Amino acid sequence: MTDAVSIPAVAGSGPGVPKTARGERTRARILKAAEETFGTLGYHRAGIADITRAAGVASGTFYTYFASKEETLRELVQEMGRRLRAHLEQETAGARDRLEAEELGLRAFLQYLCDNPALYRVLQEAQFVDESIYRHYYESFGERYIRMLAGATDRGEIRPGNDEVRVWALMGISNFLGLRYALWEKEARFDEIVATVSDLLRNGLASGGGRENR
Amino acid sequence: MTDAVSIPAVAGSGPGVPKTARGERTRARILKAAEETFGTLGYHRAGIADITRAAGVASGTFYTYFASKEETLRELVQEMGRRLRAHLEQETAGARDRLEAEELGLRAFLQYLCDNPALYRVLQEAQFVDESIYRHYYESFGERYIRMLAGATDRGEIRPGNDEVRVWALMGISNFLGLRYALWEKEARFDEIVATVSDLLRNGLASGGGRENR
DNA sequence: ATGAAACCTGAATCAGTATTCATGTTACGG
DNA sequence: CCGTAACATGAATACTGATTCAGGTTTCAT
């Protein structure tokens, strides 16, 4: 298991990082093909052969860059997560307050899912292949999110409250609305959806719309 | 494929319904074992052998009652869905208005997930085995839910709005909070969670807490 | 009681597929 | 220009696991 050669241990291990421009390109092609293949066929139905065919390489080449099918999924989740976060940060950068950031963020997320449907499937399936990847994804996403809500509270934009619970509720909202309206029935009419959620976040559902709780 | 015997066609088809008390019991044992096995190992890691072992029958017996592994998952999702719905209806029956029903429903759901963790996994994995089961589950769940919100609107308990979007948002909230607090970190302190969501639904997040929207 | 239907058994089948490896091919530092 | 490390190939391997089936056992209506 532990080869005598190379670097300390622990790190990247297994099949090495490419050391040539060609290798770099091939590895990237395979990863992209894996994203598409997992995204359309699903992790279990997708075979290594499907991936390598889509990448235009022989099946053995896969193992020059990836230790296993599962390892590939792991890397994919991390990379796709980074891309999504970067996109959302960019799209919400111009918000004037937290509530507006929520609006921009939801709209951006829905659009992103429309354009990258593989994200949903790869992430959700990862949950049952290796739960730790999935947990890590949402927990790290959640931590940043919580800090943003805390900041907004400090600035008086939202009422104090249990931000962890709020964040998981908000992530749940995005997730389900994404599935329903970005993947299942692609409505371009995201405005209506965003407006409805925005109203919920600003005023709640109650007919009073304000202070009447205990 | 089509045997010459028995009933018209179309219906239950394949492996028959048990015709004896013994058969009834065996079938039920297998279904229960499948629930447990899928719940702990997951659909793909769970083998027919694991299920039949847990049920205490020979592997061949499985096919006396179920056409395939996939068919079993289908049936399981439907049955588990029925059970959950029945439980929630019962637990929310005493609510005095919609907002209170949401509170009772969320608490009941969290507790139910704690007690029946297999529900989450079986349902979510079904999504990638046969999406139609999963869609049907949420769409039928959603339809009833929408009607309840519509009724609440008529009674003046909540403001008018896009109830379909609201319902999917609410289902997303329950789902994510269930995963986080009922499956991952079992906190018995559901009160805090329910209170936070209740506050969100009653007042929103905004510091004003009321009418300031466009 | 009795025999046909229902039920149960578990070894054998059969197909799919992740991974390996011996063998070419290509790139590039010297 | 070479020679070697990198890279690429794809048939062969090795294994898993769903499904079948030929034959025993139990149930129950008559």
Image (cartoon, coloured by chain):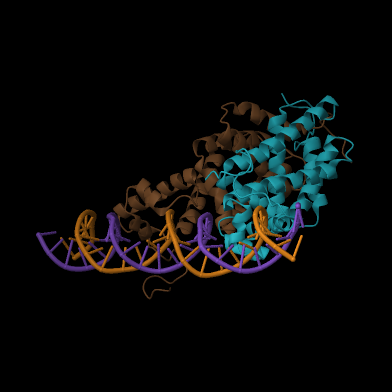
Chain colours: A brown, B cyan, C orange, D purple
* Residue found at x 50% / y 36%: A115
Any part of residue B46 in sight: no
Residue B6 picture quarter: top right
Horizontal and vertical percent position of residue B57: 65, 64
- State the quadrant of the C terminus of chain A: top right
Residue B131 picture quarter: top right
Any part of residue B190 in sight: yes
In the rendered image, the vertical position of residue A52 relative to residue A113, given as above or below = below
In the rendered image, the vertical position of residue B54 relative to residue A149, given as above or below = below
Task: Looking at the picture, tell me which residue is in the foreground, B64 or A72.
Answer: B64
Residue B199 picture quarter: top right
In the image, is D5 to the left or to the right of D29? left
Task: Looking at the picture, tell me which residue is in the foreground, A87 or D21.
Answer: D21
- State the quadrant of the N terminus of chain A: bottom left
Horizontal and vertical percent position of residue A56: 32, 47
Horizontal and vertical percent position of residue D1: 9, 59
